[in-house]
Amino acid sequence: MRKEHQLIELYCAICHQYDTSLANMAQRQSNNFCPKFTDVECMTTYIWGITNQKFEVKACYEFIKDYYDGWFPDLPSYQAYSNRICYLADAFKELANMFLCGMGLDASHSDYIIDSVPIILASHKRSRRGKVASELCDKGYCASKELHYYGMKLHILAQCNYKAMPTPAVMTTSKASCRDLPIAKEMLGDIFNIRAFGDKAFIDKLPHLNYPPVKIKASKSTPRGMKPLRCIFVRFAIDVRIPVKQCLTRTSQSLFDSFF
């Protein structure tokens, strides 16, 4: 399918969802209740930009302006576009829930991956002065990036697929300082009969986590102070799990493909 056709189908899908349920979350009590650049166009351009690997609002705006200016002649300035994206945050959240519900999970597969990715609002020295969304964000440390940052974390539990990207099952957010293990326990609180694979942050008595039913012998390379079972399980989990960052960067494409 050509990209132009995909863009048209995306616009029609968002237009349908907007008319049925999303309009209540974007209703305006002002004289500008019907802007020329509609909410449907705004949501379509933003999701289309993410689908094309433009994960920042400015990059998405410039991508639409450079390649699809004729499709959206009423595209406003970058400042107005950015403000509109923030205004439609609740509508985007509800739209994501609708897309996720339409994806579906394979009941025959019990293997899942669980991990988190930082959402960085301020890094390095600026992290000390971060004040944006203080009720949702704080200062934390990302070990994989070796980075102190101000922001939050996105946690995801995704079902593994053979030679395909994982299918998101559960997603939630937390402050940057929160440890992964307590959040994982909350995510898996009502989930049973699955095998969840994660990194070292999830090894400590994770509920409903089944170790692979194989006989494991001690290895000469077992790190000091770590039991052979835990050591080999960590290596096994790292080998079989798909990096969740790769999953997140393509979540929008997977949602788009599965929806249609």
Image (cartoon, rainbow, N blue to C red):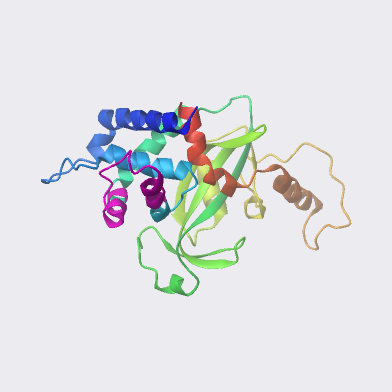
Asked whether 168 or 11 is in front, the reply is 11
Answer with the quarter of the image where residue 27 lies: top left
Is residue 223 magenta-colored? no
Residue 178 vs residue 13: left or right?
right
**Left or right: where 68 falls relative to 216:** left
What residue is at 38 percent from the left and 44 percent from the top? 46
Q: Quadrant of residue 143?
A: bottom right
Q: Is residue 46 above or below residue 111?
A: below
Q: Report whether 107 appears left or right of 252.
A: right
| Residue drawn at (53%, 37%) of the image | 168
For the stretch drawn in magenta, the main secondary structure is helix
Residue 105 percent coordinates (x, y): 54, 28
Q: Position of residue 211 (x, y in %)?
A: 72, 41
Which range is magenta? Answer: 60-85
Provide residue 255's location: percent of width, then percent of height: 48, 34
Residue 170 visible, this angle: no
Q: Residue at x 85, y 58 (%)?
A: 221
Task: Between residue 5 and residue 125, name the one nearer to us.
Answer: 5
Q: Is residue 76 visible?
A: yes
Residue at 38%, 30% (x, y): give it. Answer: 8
- The location of residue 96, given as percent across then percent down, is 40, 38
**Residue 209 higher or lower than 154, as above or below:** above
Horizontal side of 71 relative to 200 (left or right) equals: left
- Work out which residue is located at the far right of the displayed protein and give it: 220
